Amino acid sequence: MSGTQAECMQRVQSLLPADGKVFWVTGAAKKAHTLLGQECTALVFDAHSGFDVNAFAAVSGTLCGGGTLFLLTPPLDDWATFPDPDYRRFLPYPYQPDAVDGRFLRRLVGMLEERESVCNTPPPTTVGAYYIRPLRDQINAIRSILQAPLPVVLTADRGRGKSAALGMAASQLFAAGKRVLLTAPSRATVEAVFKHAENPPLFFAPDDLLQTLPQGDVLLVDEAAAIPVPLLLKMLEHYPRCVFSTTLHGYEGSGRGFALRFQKVLDVQAPGWQAVRLHQPIRWGEHDPLENFINQALLLDVGGDEEEGVCNTPLHSVYRQLDRDELAANEALLRQVFGLLVTAHYQTRPSDLRQMLDAPDISIHVLEQDGKMLAVALLSREGGLDTELTAAIHAGVRRPHGHLIPQTLTFHAHMAGAAELLCERVMRIAVCPPLQHQGLGAQLLLHLLAFAERSGVDYMGVSYAMTPNLLRFWERAGFVLARVGFRKDAASGSHSVVQVKALSAAARLLFKGL
């Protein structure tokens, strides 16, 4: 429904069902996570209050087959230029929402108009069944969890009863006298596990689990794709009977990348591990058009297929900077680029797609061959702040949005004036998995440095969760260590580091003591 917010609210009120559960997401999309694990027959998502794409992807999975999702938007012709409040999440100082070009929304409007206004969501033939008894897929998964002495990797798309299967398996393990532990990126993501566990497992956040190492016979790891592989391997080291469960297509993280990277590691660390896949939808029917639309619109279904054919010929890569208008209009190219980012990083979400297309400070750089993406990098232009603001950052009285590297150097590393210089931050650099360890990442980085120098940038910086391999990669490229975080990051389990490379005389003077 498009129009003013008041018009849309008035219209939707007259169309809501008289019975059944209705979920409203308006003005406080951050609270959408509180709805996870629940179900509704009608869902109202008000985009006038901010189109939080992560929240939209998340809550769409709470809708039962046969239900209705009402998306309330500004007039479609105007939506791309609408100053969306959600832009503030990724806009660096001093940009305002009206500075955003609206590529993401133009693409979305086009997809909505292609599908007209309604797509029917037939109810599943099994609706309600899994409250009474598990379905065949779930029975097989539970049996594997109960019997397998080695790790189990449980994968599924959303709405397939993965968390329910974990909960039911936990109850049966408890009945068999086993002490069951549960971990996940956040407690909110495992509400469905507790809902289906008569005897709930003990929950620990990933960092807390690895610090305390509580005694347990079986460890259940839900949404494992959103947890870095080094942490998962530490869990496996202490808890040989592990169940690594993850959503392949979802807002939580990048399940496809997880499948590619982690399962290869398991082949070495725990040969004989078992893979279990849930296929049958529970909350809606097979080939649901709403699920298909959301997967395509938010690119939840990329990662894996886009790399086919890249190993068939010798490498003769060509570098170019992508035009983002071209990228937004070329769906095949967009799927390739975002799919490569998905396979390479454990927490690539729909909001990253929107930021990549719309943030005014981002540039996209690739190595390609015959139309196939071999490697991709995202750069964020930071710094260039005035003297007064830089002094306030140094004194700890101002913290403008964005400008991660310049602010870290100015405040934490006590480099007065660092935020006045221009910086290109490497946000992401990803190489197609079959082509890794062939020098493509280092080759692309040379092009990034040349681009930064041509652009008059003073230095390049990068911030990441430290591992020995990553540290060596950046050191070989001439980057020096500027800061190591005092505490381990809860998400990665590693210390965050900042490394920099000077490109101008002013930056060389600033980094002289490093």
Image (spheres, rainbow, N blue to C red):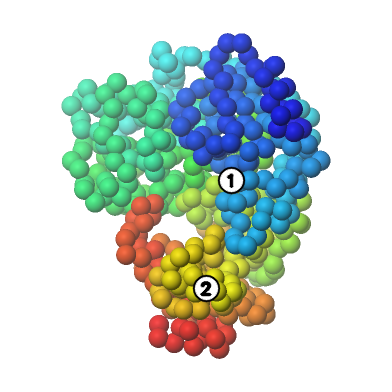
Task: In the displayed orientation, state which residue is furthest to the right.
Answer: 77
Nearer to us in this view, 509 or 370: 509
- Disc 1 target residue: 350
Q: Taking 130 as reference, is 4 left or right?
A: right
Residue 424, image x, y percentages = 58, 71
Which dot marks residue 3? none
Q: Taking 125 as reference, is 484 left or right?
A: left
Residue drawn at (74%, 62%), measured in percent from left and top? 323
Q: Is residue 71 above or below residue 352?
A: above
Residue 350 visible, this orientation: yes
Q: Which quadrant of the structure image shows residue 324? A: bottom right
Residue drawn at (58%, 36%), measured in percent from left and top? 27
| Disc 2 + disc 1, Cβ < 8 Å | no
Residue 295, image x, y percentages = 62, 38
- Disc 2 target residue: 390
Amino acid of disc 1? Pro
Residue drawn at (51%, 56%), measured in percent from left and top? 344
Amino acid of disc 2? Thr
| Secondary structure type for disc 1 | helix
